[in-house]
Image: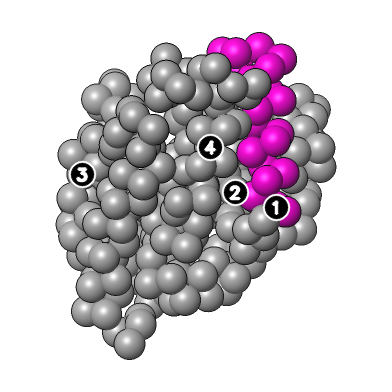
Amino acid sequence: MTSSDIFDQIVEKESFLCVGLDSDIQKLPKHLLRTDDPIFNFNKEIIDATHDIAVAYKPNLAFYESQGVEGWKSLQKTVDYLRQKYPEQYIIADAKRGDIGNTSALYARAFFENMDFDAVTVAPYMGEDSVKPFMNYEGKWVILLALTSNKGAFDFQFNENKKDGTKLFENVLKTSKKWGNNENMMYVVGATKAEMLRDIRVQVPHHFLLVPGVGAQGGSLREVVENGMNDRCGLLVNASRSIIFADDTEEFAAEARKSAKEVQVEMSELLKEYNLVK
């Protein structure tokens, strides 16, 4: 999938919403626990309810790995369902991988060849040779962790270089943008750090940014847009719990759609303000 494919979806749906499929089995509606595959059945209903509103889906692998082999089966069924029924969707494996080159090559094979994801989140801190194997697949993407939304981000990501005062996350951006381009690399930038997006855009003006933290984590969508939008939107804003767990009854999918629609309506208004849609 190209950046133009993603942008075409954004314009068509007037949305840059990514729905995070953080499908915690302990939070699923109880009636689904009686089905043969509760996690997949939950995901399927969420996807069916939001596919015309969202442009991407992002399963967080922890919620699937924690269920062992059955969780991996649920994940694969989810990807297969999206591919078969909604092939326009951009599918992100939120895996946060990153290891020595030969190991990263196998992770890339797993997510891109065997499971058919469009993108995988990757940690940058083992350097270029740990990231490059993910870029050997045409039409596939690395989404590199740059500035995360958790409070622990301050432990390392804001550490300053004593020589020139640049922060660690800024050095990650400066160095990593030499490894790829805006057709195979995105960056994770947390919405709770929205004020930093303007500086990040100086470093990577044309790349897409995956922005978690809007919704349950309290990030402001308008602040994200004001600081991070470019002339082709350049944003995928993720919301997970605030959408998928909006309700825990048999009406959960309808309520998820309502929550997603509220976000999409605001996104549409912002896209119009920036003359990206009519």
User: Which residue type does callout 3 highlight?
Assistant: Gly
> Disc 2 vs disc 4: which is toward the camera?
4
77 displayed left or right of 265: right
Figure quadrant of residue 71? top right
Q: Are marks 4 and 1 in contact (CB under 8 Å)?
A: no
Magenta span contains residue 75: yes
Q: Residues within 10 Å of mark 2 (few under 14, many from 20)?
A: many
Q: In terms of secondary structure, where does tag 3 sit?
A: loop
Q: In terms of secondary structure, where does tag 2 sit?
A: strand
Q: Which mark is residue 138?
A: none
Mark earlier in primary sequence (3, 2): 2
Q: Are marks 3 and 2 in contact (CB under 8 Å)?
A: no
Q: Nearer the viewer, residue 109 or 195?
A: 109
Instruction: Name the residue beneath numbered marker 3.
Output: 219
Instruction: Name the residue beneath numbered marker 1.
Output: 83
Q: Are marks 2 and 4 in contact (CB under 8 Å)?
A: no
Mark earlier in primary sequence (3, 4): 4
Can see residue 244? Answer: yes
Q: In terms of secondary structure, where does tag 1 sit?
A: helix
Instruction: Quadrant for the C terminus, please.
Output: bottom left
Can see residue 170? Answer: no
Q: Which mark is residue 91?
A: 2
Q: Are marks 1 and 2 in contact (CB under 8 Å)?
A: yes
> Disc 4 vs disc 1: which is toward the camera?
4
